[in-house]
Image: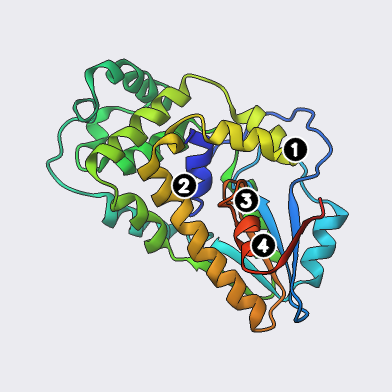
Amino acid sequence: MTMRWLLALAGALALAGCGEPDRDWPEPSPALWEVTGLGGERGWLFGTIHSLPEGAEWRTATVDDAFARSSLLVVEVAELGQADKAAAVFRRLSTTPGLPPLTQRVPPDDRPALAAFLDRAEMDEDAFSDTESWGAALLLANAVRRSDSGNGVDRALIAEAQRVEGLESLEDQYGMFDRLPALEQAELLTGLAADAEGDFEDRRVIAWLTGDMVALERDSTAGILADPELREALQLARNRAWALRVAALLKRGERPFVAVGAAHMWGDEGLPALLAAKGFKVRRVQ
């Protein structure tokens, strides 16, 4: 999993991002699916991005129409704007006193990249003496991110919705990282350090804006998501749980507009495929 997709999967990370200068972005056409059932069920699946650079427009008439027709906005975490609560949960779960120095938690060959990661984030490893490796990974990744989390699609939709339901709580999202074994946490840290040496954000934003699911899948499976344990914990298990929740909402008569990270949409184990396997008709409409 690359840094951009880790941050997408950890959408509740309510820490400040820094914007970047305006540039020209392609006309928006982010991926959107319509879900229908034989009993009149109807809903939509919208693969989101949790932070966008300033000036990147994402609204389209198709998205706005689907959102207006929906009865309920479904997001990963409904408390996305509660920064104080998110920070408190993060600190509680990520803090363990007396940990080894951060660079000592990764293999020797990965330490130069981690040191460069710290330099780029303008942070010292002493700041992480009581922070578990997964927490350090998220904090460092957030520090080097150029897009603005305040400009995320999720936040904009939540601000407009009359009714909002979260698929997970802040405890759920941070807890999935906290439950990772030490080895998997170290792999998160080294994977993000390696990603920080490249510049993928513009490519990621362009792929999302143009609805290029092939490019999004290719990029997101090139790194840590190739690890079966991490992929199961951070992506696949959640997809299965969410598909059950969305199916139940459809069956009870809701018209959900499901807006979750685009990483949860691609492939045979993404939400569109899982709902299709449950008997719904899933059609990409943008």
**Could you tell me which residue is drawn at 72 percent across and 76 percent down?**
71
How far apart are labels 3 and 1 at the CA level? 25 Å
Query: x, y (%) of residue 217?
Result: 60, 37
Query: x, y (%) of residue 10?
Result: 47, 49
Mark 3 or mark 1: which comes first in sequence? 1
Q: Amino acid at mark 4?
A: Ala
The foreground one among 23 and 204 is: 204
Disc number for residue 55: 1
Residues packed near mark 4 inside 10 Å, few (<14), some (14 to 19) or many (20 plus): some
The answer to whether the residues at label 2 and label 1 have Cβ atoms under 8 Å apart is no
Mark 3 or mark 2: which comes first in sequence? 2
Residue at image mark 3: 265
Q: Is residue 73 left or right of residue 79?
A: right
| Residue 178 higher or lower than 116, as above or below | below
Q: Secondary structure at mark 1?
A: loop
The answer to whether the residues at label 1 and label 4 have Cβ atoms under 8 Å apart is no
Residue at image mark 2: 15
Q: Amino acid at mark 1?
A: Gly
Q: Amino acid at mark 3?
A: Met
How far apart are labels 3 and 4 at the CA level? 12 Å
The answer to whether the residues at label 2 and label 4 have Cβ atoms under 8 Å apart is no
Disc number for residue 276: 4
The answer to whether the residues at label 3 and label 2 have Cβ atoms under 8 Å apart is no
Q: Is residue 150 left or right of residue 107?
A: right
Q: Secondary structure at mark 4?
A: helix
Mark 3 or mark 4: which comes first in sequence? 3
Query: x, y (%) of residue 161?
Result: 69, 69
